[in-house]
Amino acid sequence: MDRLWTNARLATMAGDGIGLIEDGAIACRDGRIVYAGPSGSAPKAAETIDCEGRWITPGLIDCHTHLVHAGDRANEWAMRLEGASYEEIARAGGGILSTMRATRAASEAELVETALPRLDALLAEGVTTIEIKSGYGLTVEDELKMLRATRALGDVRDVRVTPTLLGAHAVPPEYAGRAAAYVDLVCDEMIPASVGLADAVDAFCEGIGFTPEQSGRVLAAARRAGLPVKLHAEQLSALGGASLAASHGALSADHLEHASEADIRAMAAAGTVAVLLPGAYYFMRETDLPPVGLFRAHGVPIAIATDCNPGTSPTTSLLLMLNMSATLFGLTVTEALRGVTVNAAGALGLADEIGTLDPGKACDLAIWDIRDPAELVYRIGFNPLHMRVKDGRCC
Ligand code: DI6
Ligand code: FE
């Protein structure tokens, strides 16, 4: 045994609750958990770390981000504060296309460099796995450049990175008025070229994004290429995107403020995770709440993520999202904590690898200076992380 963390209180996230083990211990070998249980039954190890009664959760998982991008949209935010809407700005050539222009002009190295401070902020809060979408290049080469920059982040930081192709994020200027032709480019060129770089494919199914028919073509092309899918759905309007995602066996449908009960039944039947994004809800000053009661009633797992992006959710705090998911969406402490661990792992198709403190999984831990796990959801803007562990290595 390489390392043993003992004298800890474990929130394993196994089962349906937080999986509490008082006076617990975790042992790892070759980066994998081999024991998680009462300290009294723990195996010996080459190195023993006394956690002095601290809490240990699985390393946090941010399962929906647009963390890699160039530039920012503070100027557009100022316009929105003076009355312009997100849609108006987008239709006038700003929004995603504004970030697209900056991202096309940036080199792969510059994309890595500008993303690092945002990534480091999340790592400082105990994040050990992060999903990062492309979607600001909107040409084959620029989308691949984004995916390469995303993977490069995993080479310079101790973090698991899962890249998602989001070529269907917006119609670029060179395809203005020809959305169907751009969808052909995404399906026939971007997706095949991203195999080996992207772990999944996503699309923005929305009035200012792509229609359900166009989004369906993208998801079908991804499945033909052997890639899992997820979908930005029901964020600003009810288009049936969540049902569409479920019909393609999507790992997740994301945003979901306007999801219907029919959508949610379809998600439940397909095992599609509901990824809720309170940062975007808050920053966009939305008023339609995602139907959390229906997700609960139909047994749809709920994940929580930052949606870190320069337009609708410029946040790099997953801990703040824990508080917002409770304060704004009404999640319980257990639901919120499961939303950034076991359910976030499910949203990435990594439930066998991460998300709970179970033998056989990666030894990704977050060790906290708290007296109760509720503190992780209760506090606003306070970070009680004591230590982050990735693959058994203290970071
Ligand atoms: N929905 C969102 O909230 C982000 N993308 C999406 O599909 C917005 C991205 C941006 O405004 O830059
Ligand atoms: Fe998003």
Image (cartoon, rainbow, N blue to C red):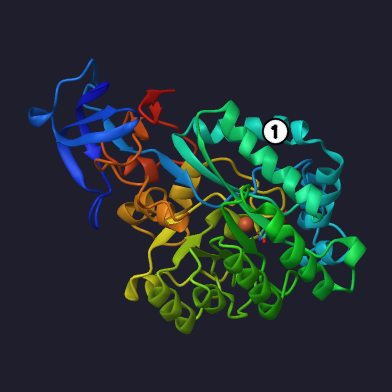
Q: Residue furthest left?
A: 40
Image coords of residue 327 (percent x, y): 44, 55
Question: Is residue 260 in sight in this rendering?
Answer: yes
Looking at the picture, does residue 26 appear above or below residue 295? above
Question: Callout 1: few (<14), some (14-19), or many (20+) C-alpha neighbours within 10 Å?
Answer: many
In the rendered view of the protein, which quadrant contains the N terminus?
top left
- Mark 1 lies on residue: 112
Of 189 and 172, the residue lying toward us: 189
Q: Residue at x 46, y 84 (%)?
A: 262
- The residue depicted at 37 percent of the width and 33 percent of the height is 366
Quarter of the rendered structure image containing ligand 2: bottom right
Q: Give the answer, above or below, for where 343 lies relative to 293.
A: above
- Residue 91 in the image, given as x and y percentages of width and height: 85, 67
- Specify whether 318 is left or right of 74: left
* Relative to 52, 85 lies left or right: right
Quarter the C terminus occupies: top left
Q: Position of residue 289 (x, y in %)?
A: 51, 69
Based on the displayed image, in which of its 4 quarters is residue 358 positioned? top left
Q: Residue, x 64% and y 31% (percent of image)?
A: 116
Instruction: Please say whether residue 86 is visible from this viewpoint.
Output: no
Q: Secondary structure at mark 1?
A: helix
* Number of numbered discs visible in the structure rendering: 1
In this rendered view, identify the residue nearer to me: 228 or 224. Answer: 224
Q: Is residue 291 left or right of residue 332?
A: right
Q: What kind of residue is marked 1?
A: Val
Residue visible at 84% across and 44% down in the picture: 102
Query: Where residue 76 appears, x then y in whole percent?
Result: 81, 52
